[in-house]
Structure formats: C-alpha cells, structure tokens
Image (cartoon, rainbow, N blue to C red):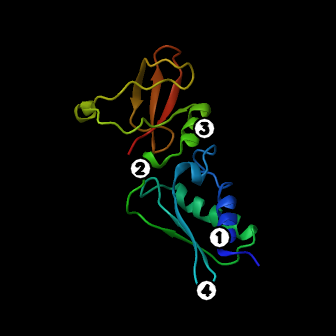
C-alpha cells in the first residue's frame, strides 16, 4: 500500500500535465496556481487553487481538467477548492514558466522591482520576444486575454502579448 507521501507525489506528478487553456504552453505548476495538495482523513484528495484573476474564465476549465487528470490517474474522490486570498501574483510564475512564455512569443511579466516610474504611468521597456529589441510600445491595455496587454516592437514591427504583472 502506498504511503501518504507517495500518494501526494503521484498527484503532484499528474498535475504537471494540466495546462492553461488560454496559454497552453504553461502548466498549472508553471503558473503557480496550485496552493496545496492534501489527502483528507476520509480519503478525499483536495487540490487548493488560486486563480490568476478573480474573474478568470479559464479557471472553470482548469478545475475540470484537474479533476479529470487525477481521476484518470486513479484518484476517485477529488475536491478542487478555490481560494482568493492571498491573491495570485506573477511572482508565483516559475522561472521555467517565464522561459516558456518567451519561447511562445509572449513577453513574461517583469520581475518585481522598486522602480517608482510605475507611479507615473511609466514602465520599463519590454524586450520583444521575437527579435530581442527593447524598443517596444503598448498598443492596448488588453491583449488576447484580460491577463495580457498588447505591445508592438518598433524594430521588427511584430505585435506581441505581454503577461501583465500583478
């Protein structure tokens, strides 16, 4: 019979295959939305998640996919619990996830900084994920999804999404 630790490791391994339906190169682990995986006394596997945005439409699909992957992996009783506090932050994105975004053509969120330019509506120049130039401009506060802004590179003229910080 498997130990509790082995059961939890198996569940965590299975969760590595659950991707974000809006950014399919990212897993729920890359996003950092998995808060806790625990086994209750009555044998229910609980997965606690935090949405990237409180109104994120992808969270329903992610919840269904989490449950499906775990049930297909042998876990009969699965409960997915959504918690909103503390709120998710882009600091929870893994380094591997940030690299995946860049390779996918989405500028990853800037690292947290103490740069006070943001108070005046200014921001650090973003690097174009296509050509690497930092001569970029925001076209729209909203990109292909609410969690992204639309930018354009002034060098290669290609548009690209930027995964917003929060």
Q: Callout 2: helix, strand or loop?
A: loop
From what the image shows, is residue 121 above or below residue 47? above
Q: Look at the numbered discs 3 and 4 and tell me whether their residues touch, using CB distance below 8 Å.
A: no
Q: Would you place residue 56 above or below residue 9 in this image?
A: above
The residues bearing labels 2 and 4 have C-alpha atoms spaced at a distance of 33 Å
Is the residue marked by circle 4 packed among few (<14), some (14-19), or many (20+) residues within 10 Å?
Answer: few
Q: 141 left or right of 6?
A: left
Label 4 vs label 1, nearer the camera: 1
Residue where numbered disc 2 is placed:
89
Residue drawn at 57 percent across, 80 percent down? 40
How far apart marks 3 and 1 lie (CA) works out to 29 Å
Q: Earlier in the sequence, mark 4 or mark 1?
A: 1
Of marks 1 and 2, which one's residue comes earlier in the chain?
1
Q: Position of residue 21 (x, y in %)?
A: 61, 50
Q: Which element type, helix, strand or loop, lies under badge 3?
A: helix
Q: Which residue is mark 3?
A: 100
Residue 111: x, y in percent? 41, 37
């Amino acid at each position: 019979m498997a130990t509790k630790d082995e059961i939890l490791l198996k569940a965590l391994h299975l969760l590595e295959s659950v991707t974000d339906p809006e950014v399919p190169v990212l897993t729920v682990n890359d996003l950092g939305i998995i808060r806790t995986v625990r086994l209750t006394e009555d044998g229910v596997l609980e997965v606690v998640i935090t949405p990237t945005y409180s109104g994120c439409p992808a969270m329903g699909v992610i919840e269904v996919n989490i449950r499906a992957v775990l049930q297909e992996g042998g876990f009969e009783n699965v409960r997915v619990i959504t918690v909103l506090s503390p709120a998710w932050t882009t600091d929870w994105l893994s380094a591997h996830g940030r690299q995946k975004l860049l390779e996918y053509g989405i500028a990853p969120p800037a690292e947290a900084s103490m740069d006070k330019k943001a108070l005046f509506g200014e921001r650090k120049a973003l690097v174009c994920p296509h050509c690497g130039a930092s001569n970029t401009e925001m076209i729209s506060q909203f990109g292909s999804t609410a969690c992204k802004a639309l930018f354009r590179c002034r060098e290669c003229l290609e548009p690209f999404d930027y995964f917003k910080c929060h």
